[in-house]
Image (cartoon, rainbow, N blue to C red):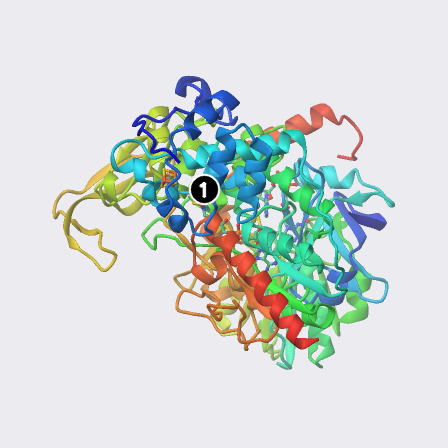
Amino acid sequence: MAKREIIKERVLVPERKPEERVKDFKEVKLGYTPQLAMEEAKRCLQCPHSPCVKACPVNVPIPQFIKLIEEGKFVEAARKIKEENILPSVCGRVCPQEIQCEGACVVGKVGDPVAIGALEAFAGDHEASVGYEKIVITEKRNRKVAIVGSGPAGIACAADLIKMGYEVTIFEALHEPGGVLVYGIPEFRLPNEIVERELSFLKEMGAKIELNFIVGKTKTVYELLEEFDAVFIGSGAGLPYMLNIEGLNLNGVYSANEFLTRVLLMGAYRFPEMDTPVFTGKRLAVIGGGNTAMDVARTALRLKEVEEVMVIYRRSKEEMPARVEEVRHAEEEGVIFKTLTNPVRFLGENGWIKGIECVKMELGEPDESGRRKPIPIPGSEFVLEVDSVVMAIGQGPNPVVVDGVKEIKRGKKGEIIVDPETLMTDLPGVFAGGDVIRGGSTVIVAMGDGRKAAKGIHEYLSRKQ
Amino acid sequence: MFRIVKKRELAENVDEFIIEAPLIAQKAKPGQFVIIRVSAKGERIPLTIADKDPEAGTITLMVQRVGKSTYHLSCFDEGNSIRDVVGPLGKPTHIENWGHVVAVGGGLGLAPIHHIAQGVKEVGNELTVIMGFRRKELIFWEDRMELLADRVIVTTNDGSYGMKGLVTDALKNLLDSGTKIDMVICAGPVPMMKAVADLTRNYGVPTVASLNPIMVDGTGMCGACRVTVGGEVKFACVDGPEFDAHQVDFDELMNRLRMFREKEEEAMREFQRKHCGCYRG
Ligand SMILES: Cc1cc2nc3c(=O)[nH]c(=O)nc-3n(C[C@H](O)[C@H](O)[C@H](O)COP(=O)(O)OP(=O)(O)OC[C@H]3O[C@@H](n4cnc5c(N)ncnc54)[C@H](O)[C@@H]3O)c2cc1C
Ligand SMILES: Cc1cc2nc3c(=O)[nH]c(=O)nc-3n(C[C@H](O)[C@H](O)[C@H](O)COP(=O)(O)OP(=O)(O)OC[C@H]3O[C@@H](n4cnc5c(N)ncnc54)[C@H](O)[C@@H]3O)c2cc1C
Ligand code: SF4
Ligand code: SF4
Ligand code: FES
């Protein structure tokens, strides 16, 4: 192929204006049109070594699918991606591309990296709009696998197993399937209908989904093993960490999980049409600097009652673990960043939060994570007045699923320990992947685990014949 | 969908529902609860499993109408289905053969007390049940408790039935009478549980309370249900709902229960506006 000229500037994805989009929960990005997508696809240099592919946790064949987009073969492009990633419309929207595929893109060394994520979302959406390819399952195996949790890990594992001919039942604790994709990531980033569409495709392929079923409570892992030939645990990281500081239990203090579950899953933003309420008052503060913190902040801005949203983070903006795009969107929408600031205690009045006593921080030497360690500046305490506060400081695996299952070993943070190759736990026939083995990661990594476990399960069951 | 097999009004504003939920019926132990959602727009609300019939595959819930969700549920009749029921949730009651157990229930606290009383009797304890109501019209399940317990004491605030006074008056009488009491288990309105805890603390009698904070998921995911016990933060849905009553910060619990009060009143007004008369209220 003739050497291509580098086009430094990327074709921007059309976005809704900040002042307009903060009024509702509809998607912020409008996505590429076919013309824009083809134009952006031209920027890919089709590198033979494709560093982008190596930087993608599941090695999506990036140059190949982009080439297909360039040629106007959008459906083929989507199917190319799906060889490695069955949820292009999801990952194209939520992957932290800047530290994965796009972070390694050669064009990025001299200009903007190729918009791999946006192209992936475009291809996925396009394929969905014309209808998915019917998956014909050639070989029925008459063996049953139980999947615990309907998040990305469970979805990916289920899809692969079904294609291999297994009978799959997904057990989900909540009243709606999708995991963090529906109860965590807001609709303005990832519309629920995309997740619903993928789940209905999974059901068409033959997956059964049992809602309101808590493994560990409704039935134990042992009981599932009596009915099923193997079990995959993809129960996520649903245990919120809380700041153990004075005033934690004042009214108006939430974990990110509670806040997002109330507003998004339970629809509190449509109260009283929906029954579940949320209390915010006018000024809300979010503590943390990750994706969850940005999601809480931007969700809060969209609530009628809320007038001001602050993000409190103890390091500087550069150290924030959130996706760059999320921080940019939050800023555009009017979120106020209080960086190098750490909460010391929550101040209350009559049982309600009224303020947060904070201390200013400065950055010292790098710590184990390589990030510069924040150190409090003595005497710099000050009070931020707030009506509510949401803690978004991370989460760990929820122990309910394996409560009382001695054979399954867990690490310091409660993460399930698995064989890194097969993802099998120490209880034969039980596999695990996604946030439950990592304590927290990304959608694509969780999906990668789901697929790896499907392979592990297949090998295990083939051996067991 | 979970079908309502049987429904009846137990007392003023209290309904009993028998619901088809075979998996839960098989698993349910004393002290555990379910979370239900009445409709697609509904809130997730916790309700105690007051009784179960594993053979029939049913569980019994007792529901007091206090707000939107519970009023909405009372519109449901036999043959209708509840959209979501999940459980059994929470830790089962820790039950031993202690000797003489006094179970104290106020109003809807009788839901947990009934199931716990069954468990307590099964392992051979002597059981006294003290059940308190504001007045005669609110009394229910006295017959059932009579069948279970060695002794049943009913109190009403106005003296319209049984002993006049509060459950704590009856409990104090027992404690003062020199009757040996090895364990007290209480469930009901927070002020009642607090009063029981304050009383038994003075007598050095171990006491457990079944707490009822606001919940959302019921699986330890959200922290809405957090309570302070012995200075430590606990999630009532997974660490409880029963805790050492002498260690519980009841004032904090009472405060947290009013977190959404204004919104709840708004929801109720909306509901009444739209559903004039379909419920008995
Ligand atoms: C607010 C927020 C924003 C995020 N933003 C991004 C982002 O932009 N990009 C990105 O890549 N990642 C993001 N993440 C992380 C990403 O969502 C997770 O890494 C990913 O969802 C993990 O997938 P999973 O399948 O392991 O678990 P989950 O998605 O958590 O799904 C687990 C499912 O299991 C169910 N479950 C739990 N216990 C049981 C049980 N005992 N029985 C039955 N079911 C059970 C849960 O209800 C849930 O539905 C975000 C996370 C959060 C919270
Ligand atoms: C473990 C547990 C077991 C319970 N068992 C029973 C029972 O067997 N029978 C019974 O009648 N009630 C029981 N309750 C209380 C019941 O959940 C509430 O009465 C119900 O949620 C009220 O909802 P509502 O919409 O009708 O009223 P609302 O107007 O929403 O609320 C009325 C009051 O109920 C409390 N409440 C509101 N929402 C919740 C919630 N999501 N979770 C808990 N409390 C809430 C608040 O104090 C509120 O002020 C139990 C609560 C818990 C935590
Ligand atoms: S799956 Fe994620 S990391 Fe991989 S190519 Fe797609 S957007 Fe990039
Ligand atoms: S590194 Fe960039 S330019 Fe090269 S193949 Fe990947 S996307 Fe295309
Ligand atoms: S109800 Fe959510 S953690 Fe207990």
Q: Name the one closer to the observer, A43 or A302.
A: A43
Image quadrant of ligand 4 equals top left
Measured along the vertical axis of the image, is residue A3 above or below residue A231? above
Label 1 element class: helix
Quadrant housing the C terminus of chain B = top right
Q: Name the one closer to the observer, B159 or A428.
A: A428
Q: On the rendered structure, is B54 left or right of A120?
A: right
Q: Residues within 10 Å of mark 1 (few under 14, many from 20)?
A: many
Residue A372 visible in the shown view:
yes
Label 1 CB sits under 8 Å from any ligand 4 atom: yes
Measured along the vertical axis of the image, is residue B79 above or below residue B54? above
Q: Which residue is under mark 1?
A: A62
User: Residue A434, how many percent across, how many down?
Assistant: 50, 57
Task: Give the residue drawn at x 61%, y 66%.
Answer: A457
Measured along the vertical axis of the image, is residue B146 above or below residue B98? above
Residue type highlighted by circle 1: Ile
The image quarter in which residue B48 lies: bottom right
Q: Name the one closer to the observer, B240 or A242.
A: A242
User: Residue B12, how many percent across, how many down?
Assistant: 77, 44
